[in-house]
Amino acid sequence: MKPVTIDIITMGCSKNLVDSERLMAQLQHAGYRVNHDPILARGSICVVNTCGFIGDAKQESINMILEQGQRKAEGRLKRLYVMGCLSQRYLEELKEELPEVDGWYGKFDWPQLLADLGHAWDDALTPGRTVTTPKHYAYVKISEGCDRRCSYCAIPLITGKHVSRPMEEILDEVRQLVAQGVKEFQVIAQELTYYGIDLYHRRAIAELIDKMAEIEGVEWIRLHYGYPTDFPWELLEVMGRHANVCKYLDIALQHVSTPVLTAMRRRITKEETYAFVERLRKELPGLCIRTTLMVGHPGETEEAFEELMEFVKWARFEHMGAFAYSEEEGTHSATAYNDDIPEEVKQTRLSRLMRLQQRISSEIQEEQVGKTMKVIFDRIEGDYLVGRTEFDSPEVDPEVLVPLKGLPTEPETMIGTFHNVKITSAEYFDLYGEVKSEK
């Protein structure tokens, strides 16, 4: 009998992707054929793993549910299930608005979804994930939830309090992934610098990364989603000591103006933010900092925005993302403040900030020309072999493009392998180079 095909469609962040990968492993163990490609959705059952972080992401999730609902109306889909952050937060409202959905599940209701399909969740399943990324890299989620209470953020309302995974469980997962051929690990969490406080009554992220770096076969480790207040500085010592821990830190700063940071409930001041970035640069020379900033939070004056612009000029972040404030139901900002900044002002500020960062990024990219850098190749695209340096995370950061013509070997054999690449030219979001002879 031909196995039933289930489509898993993941919306939102890499943390959602890890959840989908765990569900996929359980479904495959139960005998299903699982497809993880929304463009080629073809199964008789579909599970949409939704995002509920900000307005645009929520709308994208709803649009995907509607698209799959249309497939069902046309007879191309038998059952449609929805899980994840959006349904965790808006379950009752969504049930009323989208009756075409056969089952609704929160962010942590995967066993119930499996039970409704007639199967039991197997906690002992090894490996516990079906990796959907290219086989040489994977995301490793070390905790769930967040104890911070930033004014604008709905994540604690969705995921609950911070819960760390036991260290040995994480390390065992890394060993399993290495055995499957994974070389590069993106360590992720809502707030990774908080790791361990609930389990070990101390910040244990440095110890975890230290042990992870000692596992044979782990060639790159990259850290995502830290927090500046109460930062565990011993982590920088670990990053500097291990060559396989990338000099890369993704840490959202959000703003620099003290009144705005206070309104955001970030527990840090302008002076402390400058000192924080300065200390990062001093204690780990060559560190690549990725940050996220917000414009238009209630109370952000033109003067406060200009402070932010000056800060970005000074900090010269290697990578920076930004977004305009949008009011999220149930957050402190939504109840304590009026969303008093017009949308056109928010968008103007956002455009100015990103134009500034584009100039900075272009200058930093130009500084790489002439250097030889270690690159891992991810894929072939058009006439190029596309890869990344240790300072670039998948999907969000610049890439290195090497012409297929003149490669030392067949390009397909180079995917998932490391090579020294001499950078020959640069653009705002891409570097171009040539593979150096391994002689």
Image: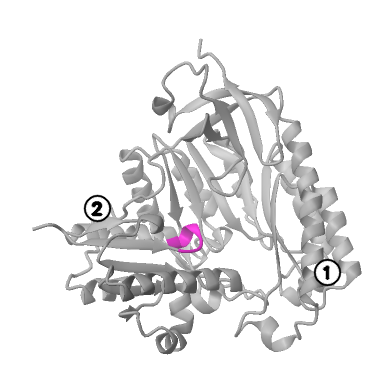
Tell me the amino acid under the disc marked 2: Thr
Q: Is residue 14 magenta?
A: yes
| Residue 278 vertical placement versus 385 (above, below) | below
- Residue located 25% across and 63% down the image: 123
Question: Dot 1: what SS?
Answer: helix
Residue 177 figure quarter: top left
Q: Position of residue 439 (x, y in %)?
A: 51, 9
Label 2 neighbourhood size at 10 Å, few (<14), some (14-19), many (20+)? few
Question: Dot 2: what SS?
Answer: loop
Q: Earlier in the sequence, mark 1 or mark 2?
A: 2
302 lies left or right of 81:
right
Is residue 124 visible in this depiction of the protein? Answer: no
Residue 361 figure quarter: top right
State which region is magenta: 11-16
Residue that label 2 marks: 126
- Residue located 68% across and 84% down the image: 334
Tell me the amino acid under the disc marked 1: Thr
- Residue located 50% across and 18% down the image: 407
Is residue 301 visible in this depiction of the protein? Answer: yes
Q: Is residue 202 magenta?
A: no
| Residue 329 vertical placement versus 387 (above, below) | below
Label 1 neighbourhood size at 10 Å, few (<14), some (14-19), many (20+)? some
Residue, far front: 74
43 lies left or right of 247:
left
Residue that label 1 marks: 258
